[in-house]
Image (spheres, grey):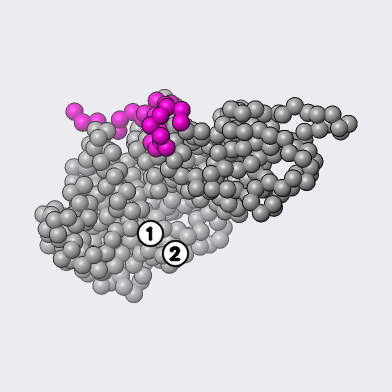
Amino acid sequence: MTTTAPSAPSNASATSASPSSLPGAATSRAVVDLEAVAHNGRRLAQVAGVPWMAVVKADAYGHGLGPIALTALSAGASWLGVAQLAEALTLRTLLDEAGVARPAGKPTSEAPRVLTWLVPVMDPAGAAADDSPLRAALAADLDLSVSTLPQLEALVAAARAQGVPARLHLKVDTGMSRGGAVEEDLPALVAALRRAADEGAVDVVGLWSHLSRADEPTSGSTEEHLARYRQAEQIVRGAGLNPPLHHVAATGGLLWHPAARMDLVRVGIGLYGLSPDPSVATSAELGLRPVMRLESALVQVKRIDAGQAVSYGGTWSAPTDRWVGLVPLGYSDGVPRAASSAGPVSVGGLRTSVVGRVCMDQVVIDLGPALDESGEPLAAPAAVGDTAVLWGSPESSGQEAVPTVDEWAQACGTINYEIVTRLGARIPRCYVGGEA
């Protein structure tokens, strides 16, 4: 019997990407807590009270596509969502290799479904070709988003050539002004969808949208989005289409806008233990557990004199004789250059920061004074091989000095989403924990 949701992997030594085939060659690693992933999924599902989709786009927000997807399924996710068609095809291969059952062809099937929403626009002839990516998507039993007539024409051509209907989610623009059909284009698109459905070329299984300000609970924006969504729903129903799934809420929507939960919620940033907006509620206040810890071994510790400049441009100089440490992580690994003289780091309970500019492959951190108040030498507070933690969970590690992803986002003038998703492929993802 094929297993629908296999147990999550729990081998702490497993990696999804490795810079070398030699054991121990990597000097840094991102430790990913799969038990925390499962906890976060169950926690948010409890809040939503409806089925949930685990959004695993961008290599699961930098955490590793396969392990996160399987863990989410083991925690109760009935859908998986990715943005790009290429990653959806990769995900389907991973699921097949893991023995995850494919959907039986009905939207109510118990087997998990995969939705991808940035569907390439092709001319119908190309879409019907043997090597068409749209035909590959249909062969892989993917659900696809549609929001324009050219998209639909290509999908219909692919469906005819493949001999199976395309399962489609009609996306409407309710105020994001990004993807989705706008109100004036919707009647023609819906009419074309109805014709294609009557032909048997498509099965319209979903109507969806995305909220632009769900992390602002009192802005009124979400209520405007929902009103536009209901108007679009009337147009769709007026054409005789009755998609069984309605979904607009991502993590912010499901947390702070109960009316947006509908039939399905899309759990993205919350699955990784991060708040959509820490100024509204922190991860801890939401009952979420941060999943990733980025750490690296110090490769050098040295003493520098007062006034000595550090790194390119000499933007930081030692205020006194100092101990500094070298961490082999840089902007090629995804450490933002904006973290120059700002990014927080902990080493053995010592809370410090990056000093000087972030380099391509390395950063320097301040380890403290090299002389005491009387001018006597002080021993280095850390040594080569000691672990420097850039971000993680202070609660799970038991070390209050450990910085959080949110602190890194604040230091870099960005959001927690960007900090984790930009982490480079040469950093091994090492998995711990698993299904309880």
Q: Position of residue 150 (x, y in %)?
A: 25, 68
Magenta span contains residue 3: yes
Magenta span contains residue 63: no
Residue 297 in view (yes/no): yes
- Tag 1 and tag 2, C-beta contact below 8 Å: yes
Q: Which residues are magenta?
A: 1-25
Q: Main secondary structure of the magenta part?
A: loop
Left or right of 215 in this view: 305: right
Q: Which secondary structure lies at badge 2?
A: loop
- Name the residue nearer the viewer: 248 or 97: 97
Q: Position of residue 220 (x, y in %)?
A: 53, 62
Left or right of 202 in this view: 367: right
Q: Residue 209 bears which disc, if any?
A: 1
Q: Position of residue 199 (x, y in %)?
A: 12, 62
Residue 323, placed above or below residue 106: above
Q: Amino acid at mark 1?
A: Ser
Residue found 66% across the figure and 33% down from its top: 301
Q: Which of the 4 image quarters holds residue 97?
A: top left
Q: Position of residue 204 (x, y in %)?
A: 23, 57
Q: Which residue is mark 2?
A: 176
